[in-house]
Structure formats: structure tokens, C-alpha cells
């Protein structure tokens, strides 16, 4: 089963910020603490060990035990929960929304990267324990983003009848209404061993659990329990009680805004796209089917678009008595994670790392170690048959990432029996006009504009002829062009990265229970390359 790769830059799907980070350019170095290599983890766990107490470990272990009460716990999971009590145990964390049936394929890549990172660190530092953690984004409220998955070009969407969908934290949503999705999904995948496995997984996850948090925890546990993955819902009173001092600072001192806004401005000045613009208060209020922003005006605190209001003293009383009613947003969730976990590294996609880069000065201000940031593995999975087609069409792996019109034009030029590149003729024409410019200057300089106009006209004429000839050759090579387009459309559904469109179930139907072990074997967290994986040989 061969595995090859190309640089992230070659794919044209990654921002300059991420490319510069991977290249460790000086422009980005002030935005992070340590670059992800095996050696740097030693300093990271030494720093974390000084700030993370045994009391925090007790709270965390208790939370995990409660959340796993109704789940089948593997030996690997049980061992990892117990090991968190020990001061030489550290977590490695990835986070993801509660997408229906995992959503896009990169859900698997995030978790596999995290699991493989734990294995690599255990091999390097055998006197330490490293636990992979999946942080469920149970407090997110963007229902539209998580309510569907794509399979074989079809969209399977959950139309929830719950009135709070889109306003409440998604983890609280009832799984009612998913029977319809299950029926459509079952009809689509048909029969057979792998299909029945997938149907059973969907049914046990969503039709036998009452809310989305429980359903997602069950699903992720079924997929990765043998690998020791711990699944955390941080939306609990005990865990949020650990975060109270930082939420109080956020309410009264606006620490996140004061530290991140200047960094965002510097990033813009450096030419980078800023992923998230911080608000003055980066907390939500979470209660009674509602998750809404907290704002402050003239000394009073309000829940946006509601009648809920407090004085300073009243909101602090609410915070200390009911910390579970306060919910961090995208700017403060990372700090919450690092406060309650003995964490060394966050594993995320390019967009996630982009907003983490805004946060280092915030972490420094509140004296919490900033974690190592690791770009998750990315991959394109092709079948052996697709790989053979690509080779027969003489398409390189890098070619696959070209825009389709560019790929086809390049291939038509390459396989055509006539030269469709008029660059030499254009150059010859330009050289001739240079002589005409000299002649015009010597005789009547007012003719220079006329000569220029004629040059432009003739160059446009050559462009037009080149395009017509290319179009004619495409018609002659219709079969070749069609096969190229079909192959690329299969591997890049909706002309986007496969991992951002395709659900894992589509791959599971093809490869069955070999899929996850294959990813574990072929994705290296320290490779920093985009993988092309051929599965099925």
C-alpha cells in the first residue's frame, strides 16, 4: 500500500500564514512558543508540569469517569483515564464540532494525528505517559454547520424540529428526527457486511442516545476506543469551576481583547489574514436553551438580545454559583482547555492554528503555558484503480491539485501532436515591433502610439488563435479530456479537497475495517507534507 506526498504549498489550498509557520519564518515566530518537533516536547512538558496541580488532575479524572459511566470502556481507555492522576502524564488534544456522523473525512485525520503523536512521544520519552484527547465542541451553537454529511455526492441533512436549534449549545440538542436520516442513509448504502456495520453504528449512536453529546461520544468511542482515545465534554460545573478566575478576569479586565487585538493588527500589517477578530468580552451565557453573548454597557452586564442583566456584583455571584452557565467563545476556549488539561499540544487544521496564533500574548498575560501547535495530517485517498488510471493518463500527483481547466489545458498541450504554444511566435512578434519603435522614433515619434496599438492587436490575435486551436484539439481528444475530468472530480468532489467534503462512511464502504488502521500506519504527525494514499492494493 504505497503512500506518497507533496508539499502543502504545492496544493494551493493553504494560506501564506500556515506555509510560513511550517517554514519557521521569522515573521511568524513571535506568534507561537515552540515548533512541533520531538526535542521541543521535553521543554514543553517540563513547563506544563510546574503549572498543573494534582488537584486539577483529580477533578479531570473524576469528570472522565462520570462521562464514561454508560460507555463500554476498553483497556486502553481505562489505562489512560487512570494515568491522568499521575504527574508524569500529559494530554495531546484535538477539537472538533459535533458534526453528524463525524461530518467531513478530516475528523478522522485530526484524531489519527493525535493518536500517532502520542505514540511517537511515548517512544521518545518512555518515562512519561501521553494521552490523546478529543475535545467535543458541545458548546458550539452553529447547527447549520454540523447538521449534515455528504455521501456519494448526496447530502444527508438533519432537519431538527427543536426550537432551540441554532441558539442553544448543539450538545444539548435532542436526537429526535434522525430516524429519517437513518432511513435515507440505509437505503443509499444498501446491504453487505460493511454497509450493515455502518448502519448499526449510526443506529446505536443516534437512535439509542437522547442528545448529540452522548451520540457523538459513543460514535467516537466506537471508532477509536482500542487506540485509547479519551473523549471530553468540558461543559460541566466542576470543570468550569476551575476556570472561574479566568472568566472573572475576562468580565472585569477584558484580558483577551487587550492582548489579542494588537496581535491581530500586527498580523494584518504583515499581510496575513486574521481568522477571528476578538470581542471586548469573549464569553457567552448558556442557559434555558440559549447561548448568547455577554456584553457590558455603562457598568451593567447584559445577555445580548434578552432581558437578562446584572450589576458587577450580581454577575460575579452568578459566575461563582453557576460557572456552567458561562461559556467561552472561540478566543477563550483554548485557554479553558489549557487550564483544565495537562496539555502539551493542540492539533488542528490551518484555520484553527490561525486563530491560536493570535493568542500567545493572552496566555502569557494570565501565566498559562502556551501549547505547541501541530498542523493535523491531511490526505487524499485514492483506490488502486484510480491510481492506475492516473498513471495511464500520465498525470502526476501534483497535477491533480491544479484547477481543472489548467490541468486539462496542460495535458492537451502535452499529448497533442501539434504545438499549441504560441510563445515563440509572440516573442518573435514583439522583437519585430521593437525595431518598428526605433524606426518611429527616428522618423515621427507621434506614431509610437499607433505602433503600440498594432502590437497589442496582433498579440491579441495570436492569443485568440491559440485558444481556438486548443479548443479544437480538446474536441479531437474528447475521450482523454473526459477521463481526466472524471478522475479529478472523483478525487476532488465539488472541486474541493476530498477531506473537506467526503464522509468517512464512503471510504468505509470501500475499505471496511482496514480504513482506520491504514490511516494510523500511514499518517506521520511530523512529516508536514500532504499525503496521497493508495488504499486497496
Image (cartoon, rainbow, N blue to C red):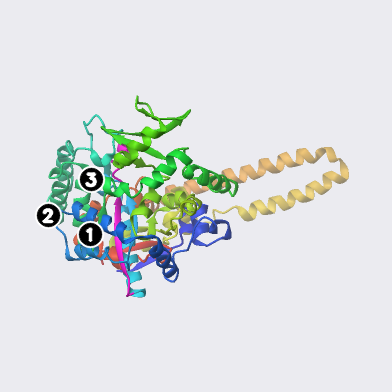
Q: Nearer the viewer, residue 527 or 68?
A: 68
Disc 2 marks which residue? 192
Q: Is residue 456 left or right of residue 206?
A: right
Q: Earlier in the sequence, mark 3 or mark 2?
A: 2
**Helix, strand or loop at disc 2?**
loop
Q: Give the image location of residue 135, x and y in percent.
A: 30, 52
Q: Earlier in the sequence, mark 2 or mark 1?
A: 2
Disc 3 marks which residue? 213
As for residue 182 lying within the magenta part, the answer is no
Quarter of the image where the N terminus is located: bottom left
**Helix, strand or loop at disc 3?**
helix
Q: Which residues are magenta?
A: 126-147
Residues at discs 3 and 1 in contact (Cβ within 8 Å): no
Q: Which mark is residue 224?
A: 1
Q: Nearer the viewer, residue 519 or 26?
A: 26
Q: Give the image location of residue 425, x and y in percent.
A: 64, 53
Q: Residue at x 61, y 46 (%)?
A: 462
Q: Residue at x 34, y 70 (%)?
A: 120
Q: Residues within 10 Å of mark 2 (few under 14, many from 20)?
A: few
Q: Nearer the viewer, mark 3 or mark 2?
A: 3
Amino acid at each position: 500500500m504505497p503512500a506518497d506526498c507533496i508539499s502543502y504549498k504545492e496544493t494551493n489550498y493553504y494560506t501564506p500564514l500556515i506555509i510560513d509557520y511550517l517554514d519557521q519564518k521569522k515573521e511568524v515566530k513571535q506568534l507561537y512558543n515552540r515548533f512541533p518537533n520531538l526535542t521541543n516536547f521535553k521543554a514543553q512538558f517540563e513547563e506544563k508540569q510546574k503549572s498543573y496541580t494534582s488537584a486539577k488532575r483529580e477533578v479531570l479524572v473524576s469528570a472522565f469517569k462520570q462521562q464514561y459511566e454508560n460507555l463500554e470502556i476498553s483497556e486502553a481507555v481505562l489505562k489512560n483515564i487512570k494515568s491522568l492522576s499521575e504527574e508524569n502524564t500529559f494530554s495531546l488534544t484535538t477539537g472538533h464540532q459535533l458534526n453528524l456522523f463525524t461530518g467531513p473525512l478530516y475528523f478522522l485525520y485530526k484524531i489519527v494525528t493525535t493518536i500517532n503523536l502520542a505514540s511517537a512521544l511515548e517512544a521518545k520519552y518512555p518515562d512519561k505517559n501521553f494521552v490523546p484527547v478529543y475535545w467535543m465542541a458541545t458548546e458550539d451553537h452553529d447547527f447549520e454547520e454540523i447538521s449534515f454529511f455528504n455521501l456519494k455526492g448526496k447530502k444527508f441533512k438533519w432537519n431538527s424540529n427543536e426550537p432551540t436549534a441554532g441558539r442553544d449549545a448543539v450538545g444539548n440538542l435532542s436526537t429526535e428526527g434522525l430516524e429519517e436520516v437513518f432511513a435515507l442513509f440505509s437505503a443509499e448504502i444498501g446491504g453487505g457486511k460493511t454497509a450493515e456495520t455502518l448502519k448499526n453504528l449510526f443506529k446505536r449512536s443516534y437512535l439509542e442516545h437522547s442528545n448529540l453529546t452522548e451520540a457523538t461520544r459513543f460514535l467516537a468511542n466506537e471508532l477509536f476506543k482500542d487506540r485509547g482515545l479519551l473523549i471530553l465534554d468540558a461543559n460541566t460545573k466542576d470543570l468550569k469551576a476551575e476556570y472561574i478566575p479566568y472568566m472573572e478576569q475576562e468580565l472585569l479586565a477584558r484580558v483577551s481583547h487587550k492582548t489579542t487585538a494588537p496581535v491581530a493588527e500586527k498580523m494584518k500589517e504583515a499581510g496575513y489574514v486574521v481568522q477571528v477578530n476578538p470581542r471586548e468580552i469573549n464569553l457567552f451565557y448558556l442557559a434555558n436553551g440559549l447561548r448568547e453573548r455577554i456584553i457590558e454597557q455603562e457598568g451593567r452586564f447584559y445577555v445580548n438580545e434578552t432581558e437578562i442583566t446584572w450589576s458587577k456584583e450580581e454577575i460575579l455571584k452568578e459566575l461563582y454559583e453557576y460557572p456552567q452557565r458561562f461559556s467561552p467563545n472561540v478566543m477563550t476556549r483554548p485557554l479553558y482547555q489549557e487550564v483544565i488539561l495537562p496539555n502539551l499540544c493542540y492539533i488542528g487544521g490551518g484555520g484553527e492554528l490561525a486563530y491560536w496564533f493570535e493568542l500567545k500574548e493572552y496566555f502569557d498575560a494570565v501565566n498559562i503555558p502556551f501549547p505547541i501547535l501541530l498542523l493535523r495530517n491531511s490526505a487524499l485517498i485514492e483506490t488502486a484503480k484510480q491510481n492506475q488510471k492516473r498513471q495511464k493518463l500520465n498525470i502526476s500527483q501534483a497535477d491533480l491539485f491544479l484547477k481543472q481547466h489548467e490541468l486539462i489545458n496542460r495535458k492537451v498541450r502535452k499529448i497533442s501532436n501539434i504545438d499549441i504554444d504560441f510563445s515563440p511566435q509572440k516573442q518573435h512578434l514583439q522583437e519585430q515591433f521593437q525595431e518598428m519603435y526605433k524606426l518611429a522614433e527616428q522618423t515621427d515619434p507621434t506614431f509610437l502610439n499607433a505602433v503600440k496599438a498594432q502590437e497589442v492587436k496582433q498579440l491579441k490575435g495570436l492569443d485568440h488563435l491559440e485558444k481556438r486551436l486548443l479548443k479544437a484539439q480538446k474536441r479531437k481528444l474528447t475521450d482523454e479530456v473526459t477521463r481526466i475530468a472524471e478522475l479529478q472530480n472523483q478525487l476532488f468532489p465539488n472541486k474541493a479537497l476530498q477531506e473537506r467534503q467526503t464522509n468517512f462512511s464512503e471510504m468505509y464502504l470501500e475499505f471496511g475495517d482496514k480504513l482506520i488502521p491504514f490511516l494510523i500506519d500511514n499518517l506521520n504527525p511530523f512529516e508536514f507534507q500532504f499525503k496521497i494514499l493508495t488504499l486497496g492494493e
